[in-house]
Image (cartoon, rainbow, N blue to C red):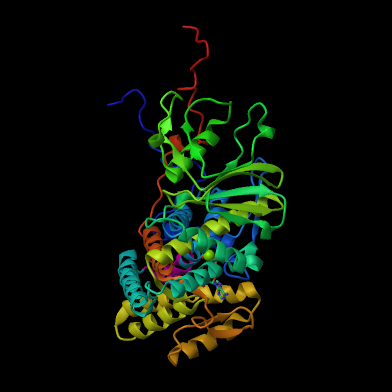
Amino acid sequence: MLTECPTPVILLKEGTDTSQGVPQLISNINACQVIAEAVRTTLGPRGMDKLMVDGRGKATISNDGATILKLLDVVHPAAKTLVDIARSQDAEVGDGTTSVTLLAAEFLKQLKPYVEEGLHPQTIIRAFRSATHLAVKKIREISVTVKKDDKKEQRELLVKCAATAMNSKLIAGQKEFFSEMVVEAVMMLDELLPLKMIGIKKVQGGALEESHLVAGVAFKKTFSYAGFEMQPKRYDQPKIALLNVELELKAEKDNAEVRVKSVEACGGSIQTSVGSMTDDVLGRCEVFEEVQVGGERYNFFKGCPRSHTCTIILRGGAEQFMEETERSLHDAIMIVRRAIKNDSIVAGGGAIEMELSKYLRDYSRTIPGKQQLLIGAYAKALEIIPRQLCDNAGFDATNILNKLRAKHAQGGMWYGVDVNNEDIADNYLACVWEPSIVRINALTAASEAACLILSVDETIKNPRSSVDGPPGGGRGRGRGRPHAH
Ligand code: ADP
Ligand code: MG
């Protein structure tokens, strides 16, 4: 036991929110609304982008919910939960990060009156869990599966999924070009679809359309030696020696990357000396080339036999723009990988949310009491997705939502927002598709986050652990300072 420094009895710093119970819950719910406000306008194909500038003046333009929230540096403990689910959505399925944040915040918003009324959080949580369970079951039931055996059909589906993911991004204008490229890239991988085998290299300058896919490994030229200008710039069927010896001083990071990718792609094994260079330790590829890409020299190893690897060479103007393009391609690549792994899709543009909303509202009418109201609240919250898509496009959301409700009541299950004509449309036929897993994950995560926030009715902050807390009397900081004893 540490008895020298007794734990202070005052748990909360002055000025900290000291409320407990219902007021604490309400304050947490309000904090989450602020988070949702930050990303609200980025949702969908007509969403806006955010320009964020950090403390060092580095600017980032993004439309991606997870990226925006990460850069916001949220400190509110409850609101942080929303940042976390956006992040985990990004890691697990790579898309739907704005949706998951909006859904969680809207769940809480719809529940606020019940919390204020004093309804016990556990009652609410129970209703929400069962609603999520039903919704997920419904998605599984109505999602459309595309046959894998028909390669042509599968490819078409994948291109459409990739294009939908790009609709809301800066590169939407080039979505045909890039969706083909993304699908081609993913198709080159082996069965496990390892993400790291798709390299993305950004080369500033040139038009976006000059971006291209290299079947193999590509990296900035790292070898130069005396008289290299005279050497041929292209070799057919070369043998490749992978040497872990310093031919030239280079950034270790570059080297490591080159090494990993080349070994996996070309075969052979890494040698530490040139003494025993037998055939079996050498790698191979079809063509080695040194090529000028923009202002850089690049080395290409094409047609690598062993592994399935490729590199996307991205061209374009401003650095921020290229970074956002890279993120958008990453989203699309994730979507395509998901769609190959689970070939089941639903219609987007709010269609799936409207259908689930209708289903849950109908279901809620069959059960009595508070649970009916709560499941009704869940159903209402789902409408935030089509509503926000309308708002962001400048449409009259109430009008469109009324049309959608009517259509879904008549059995038009795939009707959603038509962002081009200020109307509703069958988004399944319009090819606004999303992998079911993105929606399932978003719903589950959003509802779990809402439940988590509801189950916290007090925040206890340890003043010692906070950075701006009272100075610790120099304890632990004296290291290195000369102490006179
Ligand atoms: P998220 O981070 O949640 O993926 P996005 O900005 O990518 O956010 O927007 C996704 C939403 O936009 C989804 O609900 C999707 O169905 C919808 N969407 C995408 N393309 C279209 C389209 N062409 N028409 C209508 N809705 C679309
Ligand atoms: Mg998206």
Q: Residue at x 41, y 49 (%)?
A: 459
The image quadrant of residue 380 is bottom left
Figure quarter occupied by ligand 1: bottom right
Residue 62 visible, this orientation: yes
Q: Position of residue 353 (x, y in %)?
A: 45, 76
Q: On the rendered image, what quadrant is the N terminus found in?
A: top left
- The residue range painted magenta reads 104-118
Relative to 138, does residue 101 appear above or below in the rendering?
Answer: above
Residue 134, given in percent of the width and then of the height, sits at 32, 75
Can residue 26 be seen in the rendering of this structure?
no
Corner quadrant of residue 430: bottom right
Q: Position of residue 116 (x, y in %)?
A: 42, 68
> Dominant secondary structure of the magenta stretch?
helix
Give percent across and percent down for residue 298.
63, 43
Camera-side residue of 382 and 136:
136
Residue pictured at 57% horizontal, 59% vertical: 328
Q: How many marks?
A: 0
Viewer-side residue, 288 vs 172: 288
Height in image: 202 above or below 28? above
Query: Which residue does the image show at 48% across and 41% down from the upper left?
Result: 262
Quick check: 444 left or right of 54?
Answer: left
Residue 192's place in the image compared with 391, above or below, is above
Name the residue at the bottom extreme: 410
Does 171 sit left or right of 25 as displayed? right
Q: Is residue 111 magenta?
A: yes
Name the residue furthest left.
1
Task: Tell me, yes or no, whether the highlighted magenta stretch contains residue 98.
Answer: no
